Amino acid sequence: MCTVTFVPTEEGFVFSSNRDEVPQRAAQNVLEDERGDLKVYFPQDEGASGTWFAFSDADQFACVLNGAFQPHQRKEFYAMSRGIMALAYFDYATIDEFIHAFNFEGMEPFTLILYNKGDFKELKRDEVELHVRSLSVKDIHLWSSATLYNQEWWLNRSINFKEFVARKQPDQVVIMDYHKTVLPFVPEALQALLGSPATLINLPVKTTSVSSLERTSLGFKFHFHRTDGQVKLFKSTH
């Protein structure tokens, strides 16, 4: 839910996500769910039964990050889990239909990355309104959760990642390794966000998994790796 990258390839793209969360909410399995005529695949959040990363067999994916532009004060109640919202996206034929028909009122601030058959958009909702930005599938992108990383951390990681891709021309496996070794959550990130003069210790948050979706000429290849090594799952659609 917290560091996400998109890398264009000759056949499509590689889209990868680090899940930075308390270990108690680490996903145990990748589920398959039928939503209308679609088959949707996703690692399930053990806390809210939603997900941060899902894709369908119809050339679509959704990925949600906590926060929009800056940290926010959490409320006791929200209308819906952001992970349930990510799955609800697949009930709509297009991204624009989802934007216009879904009720975003009462949602906790989020960043939602959506892809649908070449249409690629970023949705950010703060406490007041929804901000929509069209994205290019020809560009390299990196996102970080606004609740864990400040703009300086995001910018430095974005620059370094783009330089890495330009230098190495990495495949999906190498990109996942970069997520594991270079992009995991570290206490210094939250320390910088909070402006704390002292190093933060015993934080409950860690990178619990790395998920990656590769679009090829044959379909999707999906990898889900838990960082504790307990689960490694692979899913392919053609």
Image (cartoon, rainbow, N blue to C red):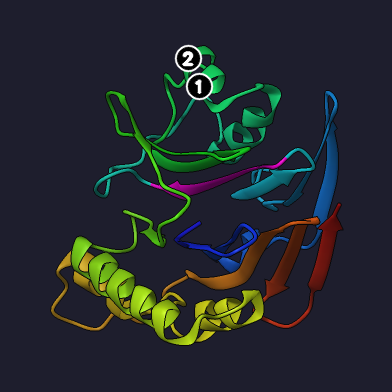
Q: Nearer the viewer, residue 79 or 143?
A: 143
Is label 2 in a helix, a strand or a loop? helix
Q: Is residue 167 left or right of residue 17?
A: left
Assess whether mark 1 and mark 2 are in contact (beta carbons under 8 angstroms): yes
Q: For residue 176, what is the image quadrant?
A: bottom right
Is label 1 in a helix, a strand or a loop? helix
Q: Which three-letter amino acid code belongs to the residue tagged 1?
A: Asp
Q: Mark 2 — residue?
A: 100
Q: Which mark is residue 213?
A: none
Q: Residue at x 25, y 74 (%)?
A: 156
Task: Confirm whether residue 21 shows in the render.
Answer: no
Q: Residue at x 70, y 73 (%)?
A: 225
Q: Is residue 2 left or right of residue 221?
A: left
Q: Mark 1 — residue?
A: 96
- Residue 192 screen position, x and y as percent: 20, 72
Span shown in magenta: 59-66
